[in-house]
Each structure stands twice: as C-alpha cells, then as structure tokens.
Image: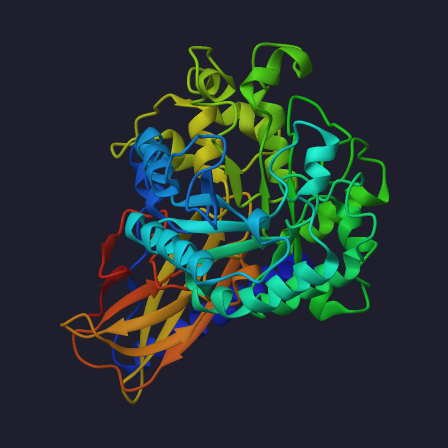
C-alpha cells in the first residue's frame, strides 16, 4: 500500500512538472543548502527561543532586589554584559509589587515598568514576564507579611491589563506568579486565596493570544477544566529544579508512569515551556557528580518541548566554581550519540561549510536546539500559464519545540526594491513540530518580472528569524532566490 501511495505522489509531481513545461518553463530549483554547524551561532539572533537570563525589579523603587540600592536597569546591563558572548534574546523578568499590598499601582510603578521595557527593547530582549509579591523568604512570618489579598491581586491584574496589551510584542509568555515566594504557588501560602480566580484573572489580563505558564501541572488541572478549551489550551508550564534525575519539585513530578507526566508530555507540543535547573551552590547537596548530566538534560528538554531555559542557573554565577554548563562546553557530543538517544539534529550541524566533520559540544547542542531550528529541505518553482507561479516547499524543524513564539510563517514575493508584492501564510506555527516534514504546494498569480521568493519568519513585534540554511538573510527575509 505504501508503495502505491509513493507511486501516486510521484505521478502527481510529474504532472505538475509537465504543466509547468506546457506553461512555458521547466522547474526552477531554489533549495538552499542547510546551514553548516560552523555557522550555527548565526541563529542565536533568532527571537523567542534559547537560553535566557533572569532579572528583577521592585516596581515602586526601580531597584533590583538582593543587590542593595542598585538600580534595576544597571543590573539588567550587568547581566546582559555577563552573557554577551551567549547573545541572549530572552530574559525572565520579575516585577515585584510588594509595596502595593494595600493600594493600587501608581504612576511610579508604571513609569518604572515602562522604562524597563524600553531598555529591554533597546537591547533586543523579549520577556518571560512574572509579577510577584513575596521576595523575602528568610522566615515564614516575613514571607507571610508580604502576601497580598485576593481582592488586591485581582485589582492589580485589572490595572495591568492595558500594560500587557501595550507590550504584547515584547512578551513571549506570562508566568502565573503572584502567589507564594517568588510567585511559585507554594502550598504553604495563599490558603485563603481562590487559585482558580487568580488563574482566570491572569488569562483575562493577558492578551488572548498570550499563554500563561504555571509552576506545577496540578495548578492547571485543578483550576481549569479541560472542557474549557479556550482557557485550558493557553496554560503552559515553567519547569524548575531540573537536575540529573527527576525530582518531586519538577512540574510533572518524579514519576514518568503517572497521568501528570503523560499529560505534560502530550500537551507540551502545543505549549510554551520554560525552565531552569538549580543554583550552582546547591550542586553538592542535590547532584551525584560535579555537574548535571547533559544527556539527561537534553532528553528532558526534548521530551517536554522546551522553548527557553535559564542560563542564570549553574553557569556564570558568582564565585570561581566550575558549574554544569561550563562542563558542558568541554564535553564533546557526536551524531552517533544523539541518534542512539533519539535526539534530533540536522547532519550539517556536525559539518563546516566545506563538509568536513567538526567537533561539537553539549552546551552548543542544547543552546541551538531549544525552541525551533527550521530548515528548508526543498524549494521548487514551476511557472504556469497566465503568469502564475506554482511553489513546492518542504520545511522541517530540528529543534525541541514548534515555533510557538513566532507569527505564522509566510511565503512572499519581493520586488527589486525589497517590497512585498504578494504573500501567503504557510501554516500555523504549531504545525512545525519537531522532525515533522511539512510539504506545501502554493500558487501565486500575476507574478512580476525578476521577483524574489522569500520566507518571512517574525516574532509578534516584527523581530525577524533566520532559517537554518545557507541563505541570503536581508531586510528580515529569508531569500530563496530570484525567479527565472
């Protein structure tokens, strides 16, 4: 049966080619070569994916917490410079509302938050955003004194709704936050707060196309009915305490043979997933070796389709200790090892531009695989009758996750000045699942002479993304070539 299907597809393809010839021209192949591994760092400029930083601000003072009297913007630049060689495009941003437990957010709070987002925009960084109240966990009593009431939280969310709409383009995802120390929904706190009301308040405050991440899987299942699909499908996860084994502080717990784990595994394909490991200072207490096993970590990130992951943890922390990610940078990884463990990678990732095999390491593999890694594997154009153009296009994603932080990809025709003269949506971003081969057939009418065929990939704010191909990346477009 499979043979018959393949023969049928072959016949259809040849009919398309013959139609093109009858229309006046043969097939033009515009398939670009895959990007070589030596150039994979070019993809670090792609938005809404990859390793992220972590920063914070007290919105009443504009100061960073845990760094006495240091302006939050100064800390932002310190972190940005610390990770400059890693070219961060994302940061987890904590906005602490602690000083507003008994009052509305005022002009000062919004001025500080807007100023912070202006600086993020200048740096080209998008936010994994979280609002929280409790930051001091030095004692239960102190933490409890920073806990807000349900009415105050809902009022603040009402105030924050226009702010979130205004900055939609800069926000990859909103984390639930608000409850418990650092907004992690600890069961020790918020005992008099209706978590369901808070979660629905967050969904209402966030723009309708923005996902909200919860810390634990039961924060979703116990508060949002699966029958409320519009709400349920907007709840993603931030999975913390990722170490060299499963842990009960992980989002789906420490047992893969549970409904929690299965549910997260299935749902994560269509959700934005963020996460972090532990602070390096805790390695001696929780790890069985000096570093977190990168193979175990890569499998975790792949299984649950992580788009982003913290490099603030277990990498360039204060002190001289060598931490996990620094070990990863020295640990070679091979194509055979990845294949054996069913981890995706494009073969060209292990080659230079000349096709010579190069050595790669685990740090670079995880860095490049977080989120999307999109490759054009076929691009052919067939001129048809009446100045029409047929396009056959094949895309494949070699990353851990679908490009859910991007707009729908578009196939465009550009004139000589680089202006769009025609465009068609290729697919929903969720259709570009890892290792899925997406074959598309499209048609353009009234094609201008010397038009260029290109693919547009952009974040909601218009920041362009590059394909993992040896391609002209110009004006935010991935240009496949000029039509003959």
Q: In the figure, 249 relative to 231: above or below?
A: above
Q: Nearer the viewer, residue 389 or 25?
A: 389
Q: Nearer the viewer, residue 344 or 439?
A: 344
Q: Quadrant of the C terminus?
A: bottom left
The answer to which quarter of the image holds residue 76 is top left
Q: Nearer the viewer, residue 167 or 347?
A: 167
Q: Quadrant of the N terminus?
A: bottom right
Q: In the figure, 410 relative to 385: above or below?
A: above
Q: Nearer the viewer, residue 284 or 21?
A: 284
At 42% from the left and 20% from the top, the residue drawn is 329
Colour basis: rainbow
Q: Give x and y (percent) for residue 367.
A: 45, 34
Q: Tell me if 422 is positioned left or right of 295 in this view.
A: left
Q: Give x and y (percent) for residue 221.
A: 81, 54
What is the tally of numbered marks visible in this picture? 0
At 70% from the left and 46% from the top, the residue drawn is 147
Q: Tell me if 293 is positioned left or right of 403 in this view.
A: right
* Residue 475 shows in this picture: yes
At 72% from the left and 50% from the top, the residue drawn is 266
Query: Of all residues shown, which one is farthest toward the bottom?
Result: 386
The answer to which quarter of the image holds residue 167 is bottom left
Query: Of all residues shown, which one is farthest toward the front?
Result: 102
The answer to which quarter of the image holds residue 280 is top right
Q: Tell me if 319 is positioned left or right of 239 in this view.
A: left
Q: Give x and y (percent) for residue 77.
A: 32, 38
Q: Tell me if 136 is positioned left or right of 444 in this view.
A: right
Q: Give x and y (percent) for residue 187.
A: 80, 41
* Residue 465 shows in this picture: no
Q: In the figure, 10 relative to 263: above or below?
A: below
């Amino acid at each position: 049966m499979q043979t018959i299907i393949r023969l049928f597809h072959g016949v259809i393809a040849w009919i398309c080619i013959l139609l093109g010839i009858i229309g006046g021209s043969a097939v033009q192949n515009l398939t670009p070569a895959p990007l070589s591994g030596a150039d994979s760092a070019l993809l670090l400029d792609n938005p809404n994916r990859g390793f992220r930083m972590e920063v914070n601000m007290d919105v009443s003072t504009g100061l960073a917490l845990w760094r006495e009297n240091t302006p939050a913007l100064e800390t932002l630049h310190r972190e940005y410079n610390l990770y400059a060689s890693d070219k961060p495009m994302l940061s987890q941003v904590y906005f602490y509302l602690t000083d507003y437990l008994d009052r509305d957010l005022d002009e000062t709070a919004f001025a500080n938050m807007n100023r912070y987002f202006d600086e993020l925009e200048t740096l080209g960084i998008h936010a994994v955003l979280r609002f929280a109240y409790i930051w001091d966990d030095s004692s239960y009593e102190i933490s409890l004194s920073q806990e807000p009431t349900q009415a105050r939280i809902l009022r603040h969310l009402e105030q924050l709704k226009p702010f979130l709409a205004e900055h939609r383009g800069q926000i990859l995802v909103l984390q639930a936050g608000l409850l418990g120390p650092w907004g992690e929904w600890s069961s020790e706190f918020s005992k008099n707060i209706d978590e369901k009301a808070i979660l629905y308040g967050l969904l209402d405050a966030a723009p309708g196309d923005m996902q909200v991440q919860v810390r634990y899987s039961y924060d979703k299942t116990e508060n949002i009915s699966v029958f409320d699909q519009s709400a349920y499908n907007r709840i993603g996860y931030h999975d913390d305490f990722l170490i060299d084994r499963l842990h009960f502080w992980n989002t789906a717990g420490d047992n893969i043979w549970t409904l929690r784990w299965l549910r997260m595994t299935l749902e994560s394909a269509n959700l934005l997933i963020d996460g972090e490991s532990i602070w390096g200072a805790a390695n001696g207490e929780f790890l069985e070796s000096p570093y977190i096993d990168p193979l175990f970590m890569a499998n975790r990130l792949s299984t649950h389709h992580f788009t982003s992951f913290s490099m603030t943890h277990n990498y360039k922390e204060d002190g001289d200790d060598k931490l996990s990610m620094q070990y990863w940078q020295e640990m070679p990884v091979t194509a055979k090892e990845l294949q054996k463990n069913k981890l995706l990678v494009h073969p060209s990732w292990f080659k230079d531009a000349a096709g010579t095999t190069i050595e790669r390491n685990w740090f670079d593999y995880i860095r490049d695989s977080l989120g999307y890694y999109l490759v054009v594997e076929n691009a052919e154009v067939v001129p048809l009758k009446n100045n029409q153009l047929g396009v056959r296009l094949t895309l494949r994603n070699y990353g851990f996750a679908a490009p859910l932080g991007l707009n729908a990809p578009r196939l465009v025709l550009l004139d000589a000045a680089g202006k769009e003269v025609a465009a068609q949506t290729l697919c929903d971003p969720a259709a570009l699942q890892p290792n899925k081969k997406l074959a598309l057939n499209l048609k353009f009418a009234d094609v201008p002479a010397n038009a260029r065929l290109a693919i547009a990939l952009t974040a909601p704010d218009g920041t362009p993304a590059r394909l993992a191909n040896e391609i002209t990346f110009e004006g935010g477009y991935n240009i496949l070539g000029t039509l003959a």
